[in-house]
Amino acid sequence: MRIMILKDYNEMSKKAAKILASQVILKPNSILGLATGSTPVGMYNELIKFYNANEIDFSEVKTFNLDEYYGLNKNNEQSYYYFMMNNFFKHVNINLQNINIPNGMAEDIEKECFEYEEKILQSGGIDIQVLGIGANGHIGFNEPDVNFEASTHLVELEESTIKANSRFFKYIDEVPKKAISMGMKTIMQSKQIILLASGKNKAEVIKNAIEGKITPTVPASILQLHTNVTFIIDEAAASKLESKIEVAYG
């Protein structure tokens, strides 16, 4: 495990973008695992800048998103498909056929989850997976539980997650109660993982994920077992860490 502590959100976003850009430059047909939410937006903005400066080419890249709300059409402004198109995909030269996001309107959820897993497997696996982290420790939409859910699955969202996500909706009743998410095994099979976190409100969960015991009640704690994971966090999110794990300051 590597911990990179940057001064603030902007510096954190730039560092994460450089890591993804390096991956794509070294392997133009990289398989990227991508995340939504407010945290990775800065990273996407930096990647768009690299593209506009002709420093990176996404034409051969294939992507798999972590999750999607269940019951939202991809044209819904709150869907993660819509989010990815507007915050990243439509601004770079990625082939739309290479974009993979769970279908939130799938009638057969088990089939949708199975086929999503098969697509990842057939692609050769994810080269680098980007993660955010919820205040309750969830990654993707893997909520705290009594066990780790292995593969892509349908999730019942916790009230804390629904409340946190309500900031993107006009009314809290509009927030979907379920989502399709990659499972922990799927995430852990990624060759490399970077987790992004910013702000004092993430300090406690970052401490628990890095220094606490490995437990499904803090899903992100399983990352302690990954052989190539980097936490890219700002000073505020790192403020409660006491660990002697080697830290690389940006």
Image (cartoon, rainbow, N blue to C red):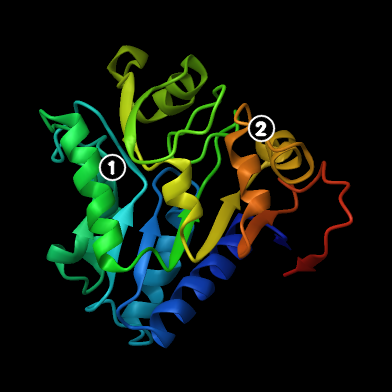
The percent coordinates of residue 221 (x first, y second) are 65, 41
The percent coordinates of residue 46 (x first, y second) are 45, 69
Whether residue 119 is visible here, answered yes or no, is yes
User: In the figure, is residue 119 to the left or right of 158?
Assistant: left
At numbered mark 1, what does the secondary structure look like: helix, strand or loop?
A: helix
Which residue is nearer to you in this view: 48 or 36? Answer: 36
| Quarter of the view holding residue 53 | bottom left
At numbered mark 2, what does the secondary structure look like: helix, strand or loop?
A: loop
Residue at (52% x, 75% y) in the render: 18
Whether residue 82 is visible here, answered yes or no, is no
What is the crowding at mark 2: few (fewer than 14 residues within 10 Å), some, or many (at least 20)? some
Q: Earlier in the sequence, mark 1 or mark 2?
A: 1
Q: Residue type at mark 1?
A: Tyr
Q: Which mark is residue 115?
A: none
Q: Which residue is mark 1?
A: 80
User: In the figure, is residue 6 to the left or right of 152?
Assistant: right
Q: Which mark is residue 215?
A: 2
Q: Is residue 185 above or below residue 173?
A: below
User: In the figure, is residue 210 to the left or right of 242?
Assistant: left
Q: Residue type at mark 2?
A: Thr
